[in-house]
Amino acid sequence: MRLALVHDWLTNLAGAERVILALHEQWPEAPIFTSLYDPTALPPEYGPDRLDVRTAWLQRIPGAASHWRWLMPLMPGAFESFDLGGYDVVLSSAHACAKGVITRAETCHLCYCYTPIRYVWEMPGEYLAEAPPWMRPLFALLQRRLRLWDYTAAQRVDRFIAISETVRRRIEKHYRRSADVIYPPVDTGRFAPAPERDDYYLVVSRLVGYKRVALAAAACAELGRPLKIVGVGPEEAAVRAAAGPDVELRGWRSDEEVRELMSRARALIFAGIEDFGLTPVEAQAAGCPVIAFGQGGATETVVDGETGLFFAEPTVASLVDAVRRFEAVEWEPARCAVNARRFDRSVFDQRIGELVPAAWAEHQAALGRGAR
């Protein structure tokens, strides 16, 4: 089975990049086709000496890897330009345009989908509001064009795999396609509960609007509870404005420091809506319960009343009430750690390793039936 991997871009390390590395470790001979590649911005395991990365013509544009957001109108054409005729299976890893590659009828195209493009389907208004006022009419036009292209591109995929039930429902609604669900891999073995826990709450997140970190800061400020915030981003000023004297912004921290903070925190506060949400799973693996907004991927990874609880409204009052309810319960770190193992890397490896060859066999059988 000749297999190729396709990924949106390799210019920074996030959850999707951890998944593409896991997929490559499953199929180490597979090349990775991507729009842009900047190995200097990634850990050594993503280097050209370890991965066979093949970039689109966008890579030849000076500074493209650092300014990929401005190149989004060109992304569809970049992915459509790849020649994938020599492969039996194409496995795209997509939250943007990677699903838009063009394959032959004989090729089985599977898409591991993190979400339909968020800035044209789920949150177009929020992203539009972040654009400069003079640019918004042009940005709105680009959104409409990209939405039409994205729907068409989704029909080229033979089979979708969603990262969560939340994303499966989005794929069904926006693309009118069904999808299997395989949760992303989490290295839960890297985390362990500390013998004793401290009294601080914790947020680990990029400081961007839809993550609602300022909401967590304001709630803890109102309650007078200590909160440590790990992360950087454009909303830092808003978070600082909402924070009280007991809220500490720690900036960027290493993975080792984050693991230590999770292992000792009283709870993780997770106020945004995520497609899956890696951080709540990692926190639970460290024995840390989660106080989460009751929508999105967190509702699939947190067991309400056992490994955390939910708040219903994205308001300070609702989160304050949740923290008070949380503090009235005795939580068991071991139960959190056991729940997290449902999302361990070994589960992902087994499920994706079984699904891909089975899908290829079904595709071949369908082609054979069509030839008769």
Image (spheres, rainbow, N blue to C red):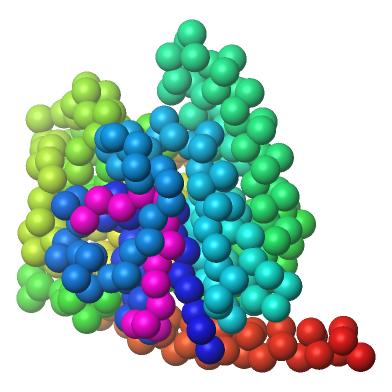
Going by the image, does 22 lie left or right of 247? right
286 or 189: which is nearer to us?
A: 189
Identify the residue at image location x=22%, y=65%.
48
Q: Which residues are magenta?
A: 27-39
The x and y percentages for residue 24 are 36, 76
The x and y percentages for residue 217 are 25, 35
Going by the image, does 333 lie left or right of 73? left
Could you say which quadrant of the image residue 113 lies in? bottom right
Q: Is residue 291 magenta?
A: no
The x and y percentages for residue 327 are 27, 55
64 or 240: which is nearer to us?
A: 64
Residue 310's place in the image compared with 342, above or below, is: above
Residue sitting farthest toward the right = 372
82 or 8: which is nearer to us?
A: 82
Could you say which quadrant of the image residue 22 lies in? bottom left
Identify the residue at image location x=10%, y=42%.
250
Going by the image, does 368 lie left or right of 225? right
Camera sees residue 310? no
Could you say which quadrant of the image residue 348 lies in? bottom left
Going by the image, does 169 lie left or right of 118? right
Identify the residue at image location x=63%, y=60%.
102
66 or 223: which is nearer to us?
A: 66
Residue 67's place in the image compared with 169, above or below, is: above
Magenta stretch: helix, strand or loop mostly: loop
Residue 14's place in the image compared with 340, above or below, is: above
The x and y percentages for residue 285 are 26, 73
Q: In the rendered picture of this protein, how many numbered marks are placed on residues?
A: 0
Image quadrant occupied by the C terminus: bottom right
Identify the residue at image location x=49%, y=21%.
129
Camera sees residue 25? yes
